[in-house]
Amino acid sequence: MKTRRTIFFGLALAALLGQQPDAALAQQNGGRGLTYVRSAWNLDPGYLIFYAHTRFFGKVSNVSVNNNIASAATFWDIQGGAAFNYGISRHFELAFSPIIYQDNHKPGRGYNLIDDIFLSLKVGSLGRSGGSFKYGFDVSARFPSAKKHNLPFEPYEAGKFSFGFGSRFSYALDPLYPDDGTSFHLNFGYWNHNDVGEQLSEIDPLKDLIRVTSPSQEFLYGIGAVIPSDKFDFSLELYGNAFIQRPPTTAYSRENYTYLTPKVRYKAYRWLSLDMSFDIRVSGNIDNTVYGAVPQYTGIPNYPDWRISLGTRWTLLPTTIYAANERDILMRKAETRRELFEQIIKEQRETEAAEDELERIKEERRKAERELERLRQILEGESKRKQQQKGQN
């Protein structure tokens, strides 16, 4: 009965929350890693993870449109979505991530339902078997399915198909079970918004003549650490962006940002965990947007000062994880450790064989050099004898 209640609670929470691992490191991560910073380790083959998430920010402000000041109101920015991450093989992982709900602060109903959809392919778990250091990379695309774009309080997007790629580097103190020990992660990435020719405002195109003339591009970065325990994981990360090519002045989010994010994860069961994180913006309140064509939210910066995120992580496959007991888990870990040891021994033997082969090649080279030296001496001796014979004649 307790397990059923937990399953019901998890399903209800998953339905209420949402998650979106945006390739721009500005959304939550559904796979292995931290809130935003990704791990270089892939999901195990055959594992399917469902991650649900919601994040929110609120602040009191006045609204002015064309210098007409409205009354004060509390502005909320809420996003929710879902992510499915599947381990295809040891080195390949696929992520499908729709944003289910997004406040857009535009005239009309004021929200997108559904918002944009992301698709990512990750190549990871690269590096020496059993080693502490792993690396990987991913390619991602954003498909514009939302009705409204260029949103305040959210990372820049122009309603066009966009794409990017990223690199991941991870170091674990326990390389055989990186999730069970302290680990460190570093991400770098690039995003191309593919937005040339777009009008970012929603007013008459004859009144707003500003268009995107060069594709907006971003450099993305993130660094973080995870300290796990039996029931809780604690993490801290720093992530942000730097525009290589800024969008035009009618874009809300055309400034660089940096956030510091602590997170705690409660591991209720082997197949269910609950997350809570808190984003703290450490970059300044610079506002480079030119208002008039787009509404201004007085007293509120283009990026939230803070943001609270809640999420749940559910392992859907393999189903054997629901029935496994502690003994089964230990046996599987022992089997995994044995396979890793065998792989390490095999690589060591191959290395030793290669070293032996290299030594044999060196010995053959030394023999060839000695034979060439003997041949040179013989030729020099014959040359001297011929010269002596000529001298005697």
Image (cartoon, rainbow, N blue to C red):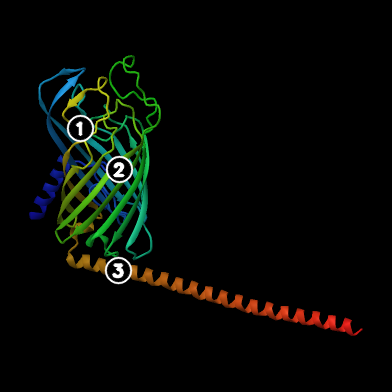
User: How far apart, in angstroms, are the residues tagged by discs 3 and 2?
Assistant: 31 Å
Question: Residue 45: x, y in percent?
Answer: 32, 56
The x, y position of residue 316, in whole percent, is 23, 51
- Element under label 2? strand
Q: At label 1, which amino acid type do we have? A: Pro
Instruction: Name the front one of labels 2 and 1.
Output: 1
* Residue 201: numbered disc: none
Residue 115 percent coordinates (x, y): 26, 33
Give the label on residue 301, or none.
1
Dividing the picture into quarters, in which one does residue 285 lie? top left
Q: Earlier in the sequence, mark 3 or mark 2?
A: 2
Q: Quadrant of the N terminus?
A: bottom left
Q: Which residue occupies 16% across, 40% down?
A: 306
| Above/below status of 174 relative to 42 | below
Instruction: Name the residue tied to disc 3.
Output: 337
Label 3 Cα crowd, 10 Å radius (few <14 / some 14-19 / many 20+)? some
Q: Residue furthest left?
A: 1
Seen at 22% across and 39% down, the residue is 81
Return the disc, 2 or 1, that comes first in the chain's sequence. 2
* Left or right of residue 89, residue 259 in this image: left
- Name which residue lies at 20% across and 50% down: 314
State the CA–CA distance, disc 3 to disc 1: 51 Å
Q: CA distance from mark 2 to mark 1?
A: 31 Å
Query: Residue at 24% of width from left, 55% of height from top?
Result: 225
Which amino acid, by three-letter code, is at mark 2? Answer: Phe
Where 153 falls versus 318 (above or below)?
A: above
Q: Nearer the viewer, residue 255 or 230?
A: 255
Residue at the disc numbered 2? 96
Q: Position of residue 280 (x, y in %)?
A: 18, 43
Crowd rating for badge 1 (residues with CA inside 10 Å; few <14, some 14–19, many 20+): some
Out of 381 and 195, give the one closest to the viewer: 381
